[in-house]
Image (tube, rainbow, N blue to C red):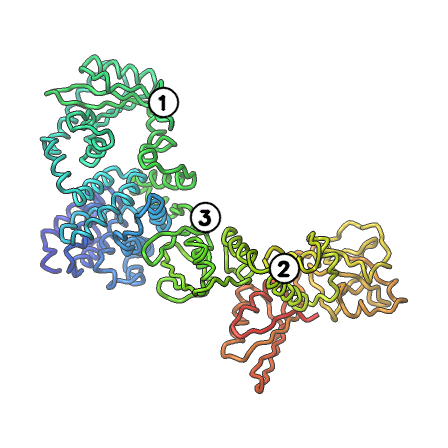
Amino acid sequence: MPAVINSEVHDAFKDEATRRIGWDQQLEAAFEHAAGALHSDKGKPNGIDVALRVLELGSDREAVVATLLSDPDLRDVLDHKAIEQEFGGKIAQLTQGVNQLNTLKDGSPASIDSPEQAEKLRRLLLAIISDVRVMLIKLCYRVERLRLLKHGDYELRRRIAQETLDIYAPLANRLGMGLLKWELEDLAFRALEPLVYKRVAKLLEEKRSEREAFIESFTAQLKTLLREQEIDASVQGRVKHIVSIWRKMQRKNLEFHELFDVRAVRILVDSVADCYAVLGVVHTTWQHIPSEFDDYIANPKQNGYRSLHTAVVAEDGKIVEVQIRTHEMHENSELGVASHWRYKEGARLDQRMEASIAQMRDLLQGSAEEVSDVISEISTEQGSDRVYVFTPTGQIVDIPQGGTPLDFAYSIHTQVGHRCRGAKVNGRIVNLTTVLKTGDEVEILTTRESRPSRDWMNKNLGFIKSAGTRSKVRNWFNHQDFEQNLLDGKAIYDRMLSKYSIHNADLKQLLTHFKRKDADHFYADIGRGQITSAQILGYLQTEPEQDPFKKVKKETRAPSSKDEVSIHGVGNLMTQFGRCCKPVPGDSIIGFITVNSGITIHKHSCPNILSLPEEKRQRLIEVEWGHQGGSVYPVEVSMTAYQRTGLMQDISTILANLKINLLNINSNTNQAEQMVYTRLTMEIHSVDELVMIIDKLSQLPNVQDVRRIA
């Protein structure tokens, strides 16, 4: 044990821990780890001092052990696995959470350049923790950090103190940690405005302990008076701290002697009638100041706040502010839409955030046993539909859950998105389809010219999560030249027909369906992204063909059977799928009555059906897909790619991730052309699944063409 952590410190810590939570081998071991830390930077809080603060707040043993182990100088010495092996999974998780918060950039100027950024950072801090005790420990570390600010330079002191007032003090307030909020604000204010702090402290003209003694005496007298009147009441005294006094002086442009709430008492009763009865007792006993009386019960504030406020002159001419309200009013004020922290911070109501904060507040007020029982069930997933990530300068950007670097880029600025060509996440270059996590630092790599890719709008490829981002990409293409969009759209359309083996698409029907006046405008809108391949494919797969099946007899439809294929007009016939075209659910299909093998199911576009002689067309019959359930169907896909190492492994990885069963793979290499020709046979559930597979395979490096084999 180093000299800086002597035996007296050990004994004092052990005595305090024993009195509050008991002493055991884990605590001893954790203390030894914290005592053995370097503590080379005087500006860094050490785990032992912070653990004492956590103990004083009545936290449990796991939180105290995690506080000791999250000493900043242990971060690079004890890894997660080592802590898990020695102290168990819960403590390791707590320690990891605290370390994650402690490694966020301290006092980054960009993180607090606006109220919106401050709110995003508060939400980020709550979103990345999985245990409310992590935030409790983090706030205690911040208190110690502020106490040691005198060892840092002026600019660092200013930034950390301002960040505390903007971020951490409001968080402590929201979580009901009033004592921590009081300490954070006072220490931060002292660092930011040392002269003002000393001036207000001097104006108080008494020590804090003396002020608290006065309030204790006042509340004791008040309790006696209320008992004599048989009024059941809870009387709570509080001394306003220096920051609160200064803010009120600034906000109301008052001098110190004009303030009447430096000392304050709150009285909670059961009914409104009791509120006015208590008011009568207070005004009868002490002289009240008429100008400071407000009846917010009869005339509630706009936000719904209800309470009686008055100020009286007590012993030695000292002014005491008295608030009187029912327990229900107090609960609404603290936790409901009229809560004190919300109207002071000016934040908007967020039901999801409110529910999670209320849950955490209740947890913190429970006993250590209750905490242990429910902590595994509590997860502070604030704003779970949003992810909060950093820019390289420390600014916070929120994007949808599942968002990618492209969603991030377009959130920064539309032009940043248009010029995006790559991204770094936490310093490493990643794919633009990478899903971002809360706390990631993202840097966008750009080019000089705007050039979005049409692939970004393909939902199957996963480039974009946000509908707003996709709309911005689509709008970019909408503003490009008509001729270029026409050429691009014609190429997309032809490539789609070839890729999915569609041989008889009726362009006139497509123009009618999509309400376009001619083919040029149809192709141009494809090029702009206003008509997608998926929309065209969906129409072609569901619209019955008019030719060459116009002679097929129309019969009354029979109810859909539970079989894979439903045959119009008849039931319980043997069916089989044509090996020539291998139809799968989603394909437009037709049945052919064979002589001895029942009905063979073909695609409408099957070459064998299209080439049927006239005398055999009478044997065609309408069919439709029934209830496939979990049925799978074999399908063949061809792929052409330039030869490279790892191509087959990449193909297998994509199919495995999509949970596709690969039946057969046959690959041939043309060494002269350095080309690889691959034929895949796989089992799929529908055409939609096939579209996704082809899109994913098409994105592999060096791949030139992927298409279904008809």
Q: Residues within 10 Å of mark 3 (few under 14, many from 20)?
A: few
Instruction: Where is residue 16? Give x, y as percent.
Output: 16, 45
Closer-to-camera residue (639/210): 639
Mark 3 or mark 2, whichever is nearer to me: 2
Gap between marks 3 and 1 measured at Cα: 35 Å
The amino acid on which the numbered mark 2 sits, given as a three-letter code, is Ala
Is 201 positioned to the left or the right of 709 in the image?
left
Could you give the CA–CA distance between mark 3 and mark 2, rounded to whole angstroms? 36 Å
Quadrant occupied by the C terminus: bottom right
Q: Which of label 3 and label 1 is nearer to you? A: 1
Q: What crowding class fits label 1: few (fewer than 14 Cα within 10 Å), some (14-19), or many (20 or more)?
A: some
Q: Which residue is mark 2?
A: 524
Label 2: few (<14), some (14–19) or many (≥20) C-alpha neighbours in 10 Å: many
Q: Is residue 218 visible?
A: yes
Disc 1 to disc 2, C-alpha distance: 61 Å
Image coordinates for residue 604, horizontal then vertical, percent:
76, 63
N-terminal-most mark, 1 or 2: 1
* Tag 3 residue: 385
Q: Earlier in the sequence, mark 3 or mark 1?
A: 1
Q: Which residue is mark 1?
A: 300
